[in-house]
Image (cartoon, rainbow, N blue to C red):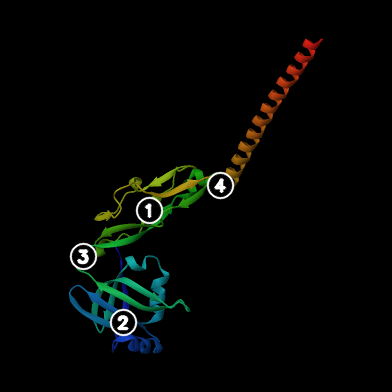
C-alpha cells in the first residue's frame, strides 16, 4: 500500500497567469487541487518542500495529504510544469480521489540480488528494457515498486513480466503479450572476441579453399605436360 506524504500549503488568491506570477514572485509555487466532484482550490506550496518531494522516487505515484487552513486533502500529483531555464517547478496539479477511483500509474522497477547473478559476475551487462511498468490500481494500493530478482540469471537470459509476482489489487495495462523487462547481455569485449574468432575462421576456410584450387591447377598442368611427352 502506498504511504501518505504530508505536504503543507496555503490558499492563494486570484486566478490566471498574472496571479500565478505574483505567487512565484512571493517565493511560492502556485498549485491547484481539483476532482472528486468538489470545487477546485487554488493553493501555493513552499518550493523547498516541493523540491524535497521531487528528489524522491515516484512523485506521480505517491499519495499526498495536503493540509490547507486546517483541512486535509488526500491527493495525487497529476501534472508538473518545470521552468525550461532554471529547471525549477512552477506549477503542480493535484487531484482528489475517492475509494472507488482507479488510476493508470507507472510503477518503478527495482532489481535485486545483482551479487547472486552469474551473468553479471561473468562480465555481463544488465540491459533494462522497462524502467517502469504501467498498472491500474486504487490510489491507496499503489505499489512502491516492482521487484525483479536477478539471482541465478546468466548471460543471454531475459526477464519477462510473466515471471514477476504482481501486487494485489493491481492489474497490467498491457495484457496482449509477455513483454520483456530486462536482459543479461554479453559484455562488449566478449562479443568483439567472438566476432574476431568468426573472422579468423572465415579467413582460414577461404585460404583452405584457395589452396585446394591451386593443387588442382598444378595437377592439371602436370597431366597436360605428360600427355605432350
Q: CA distance from mark 4 to mark 3?
A: 46 Å
Q: Quadrant of the C terminus?
A: top right
Q: Nearer the viewer, mark 4 or mark 1?
A: 4
Q: Residues within 10 Å of mark 1 (few under 14, many from 20)?
A: some
* Residue 204 % position (x, y): 67, 31
Q: Residue at x 36, y 87 (%)?
A: 23
Of all residues, the one furthest to the right in this rendering is 229
Q: Secondary structure at mark 2?
A: strand
Q: Is residue 171 left or right of residue 122?
A: left
* Residue 150 % position (x, y): 44, 47
Point out the tag, 2 or 4, that comes first from the N-terminus.
2
Point out the tag, 4 or 3, that comes first from the N-terminus.
3
Q: Which mark is residue 101?
A: 3
* Residue 185 % position (x, y): 50, 46
Q: Secondary structure at mark 3?
A: loop
Point out the tag, 4 or 1, that comes first from the N-terminus.
1
Q: From where the camera sits, is residue 16 visible? A: yes
Does 13 sit above or below residue 38? below
Which quadrant of the figure has residue 227?
Answer: top right
Q: Secondary structure at mark 1?
A: strand
**Residue that label 4 marks:** 187
Point out the tag, 2 or 3, that comes first from the N-terminus.
2
Q: From where the camera sits, is residue 144 visible? A: no
**Residue that label 1 marks:** 147
Q: CA distance from mark 4 to mark 1?
A: 24 Å
Q: Residue at x 48, y 50 (%)?
A: 126
Amino acid at each position: 500500500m502506498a504511504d501518505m506524504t504530508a505536504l503543507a500549503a496555503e490558499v492563494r488568491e486570484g486566478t490566471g497567469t498574472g496571479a500565478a506570477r505574483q505567487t512565484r514572485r512571493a517565493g511560492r509555487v502556485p498549485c491547484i487541487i481539483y476532482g472528486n466532484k468538489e470545487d477546485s482550490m487554488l493553493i501555493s506550496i513552499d518550493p523547498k518542500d516541493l523540491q524535497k518531494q521531487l528528489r524522491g522516487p515516484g512523485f506521480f505515484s505517491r499519495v499526498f495529504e495536503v493540509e490547507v487552513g486546517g483541512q486535509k486533502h488526500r491527493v495525487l500529483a497529476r501534472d508538473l510544469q518545470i521552468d525550461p531555464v532554471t529547471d525549477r517547478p512552477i506549477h503542480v496539479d493535484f487531484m482528489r480521489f475517492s475509494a472507488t477511483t482507479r488510476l493508470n500509474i507507472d510503477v518503478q522497477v527495482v532489481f535485486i540480488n545483482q551479487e547472486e547473478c552469474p551473468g553479471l559476475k561473468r562480465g555481463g551487462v544488465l540491459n533494462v528494457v522497462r524502467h517502469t511498468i504501467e498498472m491500474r490500481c486504487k490510489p491507496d494500493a499503489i505499489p512502491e515498486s516492482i521487484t525483479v530478482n536477478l539471482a541465478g540469471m546468466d548471460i543471454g537470459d531475459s526477464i519477462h513480466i510473466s515471471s514477476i509476482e504482481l501486487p494485489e489489487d493491481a492489474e497490467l495495462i498491457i495484457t496482449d503479450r509477455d513483454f520483456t523487462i530486462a536482459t543479461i547481455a554479453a559484455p562488449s569485449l566478449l562479443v568483439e572476441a567472438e566476432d574476431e574468432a568468426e573472422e579468423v575462421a572465415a579467413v582460414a576456410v577461404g585460404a583452405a579453399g584457395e589452396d585446394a584450387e591451386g593443387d588442382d591447377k598444378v595437377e592439371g598442368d602436370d597431366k597436360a605436360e605428360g600427355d605432350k611427352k
